[in-house]
Amino acid sequence: MNDADWLRLDAQLCFRLYAASRAVTRCYQPLLAGLGLTYPQYLVMLVLWEADDLTVKAIGERLSLDSGTLTPLLKRLEQAGLLRRERRAGNEREVRIVLSEAGRDLREQAKSVPPGLMAAMGLSLEEIGALRGLLDKLLAHAGAAEG
């Protein structure tokens, strides 16, 4: 590839990642509609299904989201009855997020999402594993370059 080819849109990794991210998010939409969740809400629920009773800060760190982005998501999930936001007596500034029974029950329904996504993307389990490995490597190196 010559120098001029590197400036073609099709040669840009960033564009492929951007387009792929948007395409995958679109694949999630019909799968999550039945759960009553948006994609960002689904990510929050995934974090809480792994470890319930977390601080807003811990959830934000796990998802790389600031509290200004995360707080409205949590409020909508609370309004939907999937979680509770609680202030602890020992530290009024700390808000902890606790799944409700409905939020815990939704996890069972959500088990259909990963296989549905795999089918929608047309990738095998092995291909998804390989792609995830490459993306993890990219994120680790890009994160190290930032710091």
Image (tube, grey):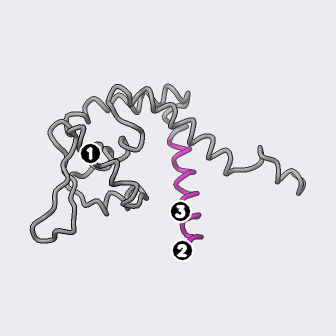
Q: Nearer the viewer, mark 2 or mark 3?
A: 2
| Image depth: mark 3 or mark 1 in front | 1
Residues drawn in magenta: 129-147
Residue pictured at 26% horizontal, 45% vertical: 49
Marks 2/1: CA distance?
Answer: 30 Å
**Residue name at image x 39 percent, y 59 percent:** 68
- Disc 1 packing (10 Å; few <14; some 14–19; many ≥20): some
In the rendering, which numbered label is found on residue 147? 2
Q: Is residue 89 magenta?
A: no
Q: Position of residue 146 (x, y in %)?
A: 57, 70
* Three-letter amino acid code of the residue under disc 2: Gly
Query: Which mark, by number, is residue 140?
Result: 3
Ranked by sequence position, the earlier of labels 2 and 1 is 1
- The kind of residue tagged 1 is Trp
Which circle's residue, 2 or 3, is located before the other in the chain? 3
**In-image side of 92 versus 76 (left or right):** left
* Secondary element type, mark 1: helix
Q: Is residue 101 above or below residue 58?
A: above
